[in-house]
Image (cartoon, rainbow, N blue to C red):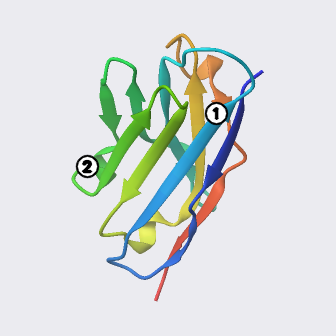
Amino acid sequence: QVQLAESGGGLVQPGGSLRLSCAASGGHFRINTMGWYRQAPGKQRELVATRTTADDTHYADSVKGRFSISRDIARHMVYLEMNNLRPEDTAVYYCIADLHGWGPNYYWWGQGTQVTVSV
């Protein structure tokens, strides 16, 4: 079992910044991939960013140049630095962990943290 706990969401004005954090717990393991997905009201859940232990990163086109994902592998942490936020970034952000790098069917999911971008 892997438990994921997100923090750092909130309300921010357009153009502002937020930093999300996610801590994994539940055992002694090495996590191949950690990352973030999001789901806006009425929309499907979508990839935001992922990062492997080999530092391979993937970003959604919509966040490239604005968001940055980082990890503390030893502490089982993943972070998402979000800059120049837009109203369309409003969503629930979910942390994921993929122990072996086997893909979405093997993801562990956090409970989500709300990010709202509004004046």
Query: Which quadrant is home to the N terminus?
Result: top right
Q: Position of residue 93 (x, y in %)?
A: 57, 52
- Element type at mark 2: loop
Q: Position of residue 95 (x, y in %)?
A: 58, 41
Q: Residue at x 37, y 43 (%)?
A: 69
Q: Is residue 117 left or right of residue 94?
A: left
22 relative position to 47: left or right: right
Provide residue 82's location: percent of width, then percent of height: 37, 60
Using the image, tell me which numbered label, if any, was put on residue 77: none
Residue beneath the point at 67% across and 51% down: 112
Residue at mark 1: 24
As helix, strand or loop, the secondary structure at mark 1 comes to strand
Residue 67 vs 119, above or below: the answer is above
Which amino acid type corresponds to the residue marked 2 in the rendered image?
Answer: Lys
The residue carrying pointer 1 sits among few (fewer than 14), some (14 to 19) or many (20 or more) residues within 10 Å by Cα, namely: many
Q: Residue under circle 2?
A: 64
- What's the CA distance linking mark 2 and mark 1? 25 Å
Quick check: 41 above or below 58? below
x and y, in percent, of residue 72 in the image:
44, 34
Q: How many other residues sit within 10 Å of disc 2, few (<14), some (14-19) or many (≥20)?
A: few
State if disc 1 and disc 2 touch (CB < 8 Å).
no
Considering every residue shown, the one lying at the far bottom of the view is 119
Which is in the foreground here, disc 2 or disc 1? 1
The amino acid type, in three-letter code, at marker 1 is Ala
- Asked which quadrant contains residue 43, the reply is bottom right
- Is 65 left, or right, of 43 in this rendering? left
**Whether residue 83 is situated above or below residue 29 in the rendered picture:** below
